[in-house]
Image: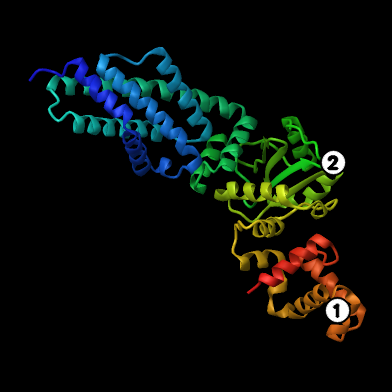
Amino acid sequence: MTSLPVAAREHVRQEMVADPRVVAAIVSAVHEQVPVYAALDDSRLPEVRAIAAWGLERLLDLWVTDGALEPSDLRRLRGIAAARAADGRPVQAVLRAYRVAATVLTDEIAARAPRLAAADAFALSRMLLTALDTLSEEMTTAYAATDEDLAADRDRALRLLLDDLIAGRHASVGALSDRSARLGVQLPDPYCLLVAEPMGAERPEMALDAVTGLLEALDVPGVPGVPGDEVASSATVRGSRAVLLLPGAAAARAGAVLGARSWRGCAITGESLDRVAVAHRLAADALDTAPAHAHRPGRVLTDADAHVLALLGGHPAAAPDQVARLVLGPLTDPGQRHLMEALTAYIDAGSASAAARVLHLHAQSLRYRLRRIHALTSRDPRDPWQRLTLDIARTIRP
C-alpha cells in the first residue's frame, strides 16, 4: 500500500485543527489520566486548552511536512517548563500529559484515515517519538534550571507560591507540602491570611517594598534562617492591596499595626491551607463591601465579618448556622443563655436601661452582661457595625 500523498495528510490536518472536539478530547484525557491536572482549578483550564491547541497544530504540521521542532518551538517549550516549575507542577506529570496528548492525537488521526498506509503510520510514529524525546530533554532542563533559580531566591519563590495559592492552583495539602519541602520551608498552619490596603479614596498600585515593610512591622520572619526549621511567612500584591500569609498568632497584632499606618484590612484564620483561595476571596470581598464604620482603629475585619458581608451580598460562603457560630462564639453554649437573652433584649430595646427593664435587672447588671458578651465574642454590642453582625447572627441562628 502506498503512502498518503501530502495533500491527503493536509486534509486530515485541516479537519482536525478545525474540529474543537479534538482539543477537548486531549484536555479531557489529560484531566482524567494525570492526577495533577485533575486537581487544577477552572482558571487554569484555558491555559491547558491553549497549549493543547498549539501542540496539536504543530505536531500535525510536522507529520504533514516530515519536519522537526524548530528553535521557536523549543523556546516555547522551555517557557512552558519554566512556568510549570514556578507553579509547582511536577515535571514528570507535565511530560506524562504530553504523552497522553500524543496518544489521543494518534487515535484521532486513525479515526479519520482508516486506510492509513504503513509509511504514513511510520512517519507519524517517528515524528511523535522524536518530538517527545526532544521536548522531554528541553523541558526537563528548563524545569530544573528554573527550580534551582527559585530555590536560590526563596523570597520570590514564596511569593510565587502565595500567588498560586490565591489563584487556587493547589488543590491538596500534599501538593503544598511537596512544594514547600523543595524550598526548605514550612507554611504556617494554622495561618492568617491578611488582606490590607491604605485608607482613603485614592489607592494606587501597591509597591512590593510596602508589603515587605508590613511584614517587618508585624514582626514576622519572611524567610527562615535554617531551611525547614521555622515557619515561613510570605507576601504578595494584588492591585492596591497587600496579601500576607502569616502564622495564625499574627492576627492579634494586625489591628494595631494597620491602625498605626492608617490602613484597613481583613484577617481570615478559619480556612485550611488548601482553601487559601477561598480565604482571599472572602477577605477581598469584605474590603470591597464593608461600610466605613466597620473599620475601627486598631481592629481588622475577621472571618465572622467577612461571612456576614457575604451573606448580606447574597453569596454566602458558609451556611447560616456556621455564620452564627462564627459571630456568636461561646454565646451559643446553653450555659450562656442569660447572655443571649441580654443581647436580644439590648438589640430589641435599643438601650441598656430599657433592656434591663425588660429583663427585670438592674441596669448595671445588664451592662456587665454586655461587657461579658464583648469579652467572649470580641464584639462590642454598643458599636454599630458589631451590633449589626450580632443582630444578624442571633436572627439566623437555628
User: Mark 1 — residue?
Assistant: 355
Q: Quadrant of residue 64?
A: top left
In the image, taking residue 328 as reference, residue 81 lies left or right, namely left
Q: CA distance from mark 2 to mark 1?
A: 39 Å
Please, what secondary structure does the residue beneath circle 1 have?
helix
| Residue located at (38% from left, 29% from top) | 53
**In this picture, is 119 found above or below 296?**
above
Mark number displayed over residue 298: none
**In this picture, is 191 found above or below 318?**
above
**Quadrant location of the N terminus?**
top left
Q: Residues within 10 Å of mark 1 (few under 14, many from 20)?
A: many
| Residue located at (56% from left, 24% from top) | 149
| Residue located at (26% from left, 14% from top) | 65
Mark number displayed over residue 261: 2
| Residue located at (60% from left, 37% from top) | 163
Q: Quadrant of residue 323?
A: bottom right
Percent position (x, y) of residue 128? 27, 23
User: Disc 2 or disc 1, which is closer to the eye?
Assistant: 1
Percent position (x, y) of residue 235? 68, 38
